[in-house]
Amino acid sequence: MYTHIKSSIVMTQLKYILLGSLLLTACAHTPLNNRGNQLENTQAEAEDQVEQPDTQVEVPKVLPNVALSSEILYEFLLSEIAGQRGNDTLAIEGSSDLAKKTRDPRLAMRAAHIALQFGQTDKAIEALKVWREADPSSLSARRMLTSVFVRSGKLAEAEEELAKLLKADEAHNAQNFIQIYQMLAPNPDKTGALKLLRDLAQPYPRLAEAHWGVAQLAQASGDDALALSEAKEARRLRPEWDMAISLEALLLQKSAPQQGLDILRSYLSHYPKASEIRLQYARALLDQKQYKLAREEFQRLSDANPENPDMAYAIALISLQLNDLKSAETELKLALSKGKKDQDTVQYYLGQLSEAKKNEDEALTYYRNVKGGESQLAAEIRIAYLLSKRGQFAEARQLLQQAPAANDQQRVQLVMAEAQLLRDANQFDEAYQLLNQTLEKFPDQPDLIYDTAMMADKVGKPDVFENLMRKLIKIKPDHAQAYNALGYGLLERNERIPEAMQLVEKALELAPDDASIMDSVGWGYYRNGKLDESVKILRRAYTASNANPEIAAHLGEVLWVHGDKQEAKKIWQDSLKENSGNEQLQTVIKKFDH
């Protein structure tokens, strides 16, 4: 059977000069440890630049008793101005020299910031070591030094610092391990990062956060077995911790999805207000195509967040999957009234629902309300289809020809839609010419090749059809519908049946649940006289397709020849009630049941 395929503070030199003048007149003999605001502000700026999640740089407990001499102030301002002007050498050397000379941890940290700003990692490490030596009790110094080690690929040095940090700050190691994971996660050396964290976690076997971090990095490095084992241990140690539950369930989605669902459901029975876990549970149900249960969970989320339009939108899409059109329409209108950001998509879906209700005037209104976004092109195509259906054929074609296209792919889509209008109007030759001319401009566009080939077959050009389908298979070797169309075409012409069967069976191998391909294979069995095999697979195709009329025609014919004439008649008549104008169905009925 054929189918039709579809994201500084910039100070001027004048400000620095004015600042320098004020400091020189007011603070020329003030010790550095009494200069609060200026260096604390500098420290805060550097902290923002050195990426340490959820970490604050503590105020140094001990500061050197160094007088703020004119020479020190001059060096400080000189390095700052040099940095603002992009003179990296002067800025880095000046700030580094000042840090070493004063041994002030704030100036050392500022020197590190400047070095990092200009990409000088070694100089940053040098300055951070000065800070650490000047203030040995500073955990921030160790954290920032470690961060720079990690970002520069010095994992061994990072491990040494992190081990000391964990030992010095054991009271906060739960948060420390989470921060260490966050620091290591972006590192391209996934294996090295995992080994580092496993080594650090070894002395802390009863810390759930350590196991959680290892599980995260194991997953990133592709060791799913280790990831799952560590996630389970994290949950065992802290069964109330939602992050451990979430990770284990996520990992189980690959190997044991139902077990993952059970874990989430059990957690929610104890913590029903855990909205993030409920959202994960709802999405997991959706992934497993458990649509009714998924809709119930999204409804609970919606009830808890009545002003959230995304929940109503999710419920609407699930309702569409369940073919519950009334609920889908209600929820889409609710999402619209709640201010769903992507209103164009909502309008498009409402148009689709109106078409399903056979209310074409309402559908046109919704489609015309789509003013942009990803749904605009689809809406224009539907408007054209409905206009053509009303007999406004010229207006429909003009709409498609004038519709804005953002790229070549959209231009091709518009041409294919216009060709479909021509096909529906039985203007097959003109449809073929339009597609063929467009194919000359876009010779490697798969969907266009497919449509042109199908139209070539329709106008009696089997050689063109076969050449184009073989070209498509060469471009996309996994294109199941190309194999299917080529094989089915040979079956219909009763040519090269063994080759035809190889083609449709290859298509079924690529897409085992596709009803149209099942139909082709079943039809091939019929051509080969294998009636029992044919009936079996055609029954599957008929059920999977929701009683497609072309499949009904094939199944009925095979049943008739097989001797089951009463069942054949019933299948034909049942399909005819919903598809009275189907030419293939009418032809087979006239052929056998007369």
Image (cartoon, grey):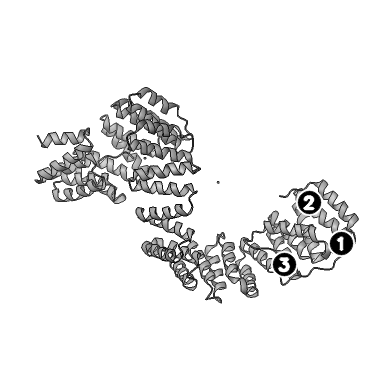
Q: Amino acid at mark 2?
A: Ala
**Circle 2 — which element?**
helix
- Residue 120 percent location from the top left of the image: 70, 57
- Give neighbour class at mark 2: few <14, some 14-19, many 20+ (Cα, 10 Å): some
Quarter of the figure with residue 294: bottom left
Horizontal arrangement in the rendering, residue 208 relative to residue 325 (left or right): right
The reply, left or right, for residue 252 in relation to residue 389 is right
As drawn, which residue projects farthest toward the top?
A: 394
In terms of secondary structure, where does tag 3 sit?
A: helix
Q: Earlier in the sequence, mark 1 or mark 2?
A: 1
Instruction: Name the secondary structure under disc 1.
Output: loop
Any part of residue 467 in sight: yes
Dot 1 amino acid type:
Leu
- Of circles 1 and 2, the one toward us is 1
Q: Quarter holding the C terminus? A: top left
Position of residue 376 measured from the top left corner of the image (x, y, whole percent): 45, 35
Q: Nearer the viewer, residue 264 or 539?
A: 264
Disc number for residue 129 = 3
Quadrant that contains the N terminus: top left
Residue highlighted by disc 1: 68
Tell me whether the residue at label 3 lies in contact with that at label 1, contact meaning CB atoms closer than 8 angstroms.
Answer: no
Please state the horizontal and vertical placement of residue 298, each as a whole percent of the image. 42, 53
Q: Which residue is mark 2?
A: 82
Above or below 434: residue 311: below
Q: Nearer the viewer, residue 245 or 564?
A: 245
Q: Percent position (x, y) of residue 71? A: 87, 59
